[in-house]
Image: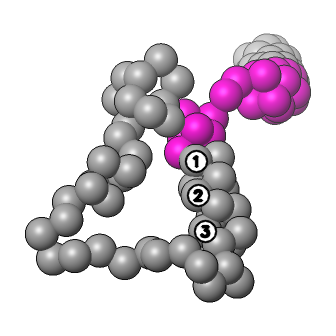
């Protein structure tokens, strides 16, 4: 083998080794970021209030109220055609969203 072939062999091996090391390092970095993001995301998810949590709780309360009246035959739960008082009971977003704001 000539001197140029030996030099080319050494250069080729060093480039391949460098690329392999870079690939392994990038895999390590990406894997550690993914693990870190997953653990931090779970912690934030547990601490953060869901934006529609108030709405879901309001639905549960309304369900419980209606269910408690289901077997009671002494209440009146119908309306006249011109009676709009039931519209006052309709929940509004400011009633159930945190801070009264819309997203």
Q: Nearer the viewer, mark 2 or mark 1?
A: 2
**Residue 12 appears in view:** no
What residue lies at 38% left-to-right and 50% top-to-bottom?
A: 89
Region rendered in magenta: 32-56
Neighbour class for label 1 at 10 Å: few (<14), some, many (≥20)? some
Is residue 37 or residue 28 the one in the foreground? Answer: 37
Q: Quadrant of the C terminus?
A: top left
Mark 2 and mark 1 residues within 8 Å of each other at the beta carbon: yes
Looking at the rendered structure, which numbered label has been put on residue 62? Answer: 2
Q: CA distance from mark 2 to mark 1?
A: 6 Å
**Mark 1 or mark 3: whose residue is earlier in sequence:** 1
Mark 2 and mark 3 residues within 8 Å of each other at the beta carbon: yes
Q: Position of residue 42 (x, y in %)?
A: 82, 31
Q: Of helix, strand and loop, which one carries label 2?
A: helix
Mark 1 and mark 3 residues within 8 Å of each other at the beta carbon: no
Dividing the picture into quarters, in which one does residue 37 lie?
top right
Q: Disc 1 designates what residue?
A: 58
Is residue 91 or residue 2 the one in the foreground? Answer: 91
Tell me if 12 is positioned left or right of 21 in this view.
left
């Amino acid at each position: 083998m000539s001197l140029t072939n030996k030099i080319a062999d050494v250069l080729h091996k060093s480039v391949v080794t460098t690329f392999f090391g870079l690939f392994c390092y990038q895999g390590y970095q990406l894997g550690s970021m993914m693990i870190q993001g997953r653990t931090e995301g779970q912690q934030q998810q547990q601490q953060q209030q869901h934006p529609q949590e108030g709405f879901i709780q309001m639905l549960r309360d309304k369900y419980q109220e209606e269910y408690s009246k289901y077997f009671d035959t002494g209440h009146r739960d119908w309306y006249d055609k011109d009676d709009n008082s039931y519209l006052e009971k309709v929940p509004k977003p400011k009633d159930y969203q945190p801070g009264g704001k819309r997203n």
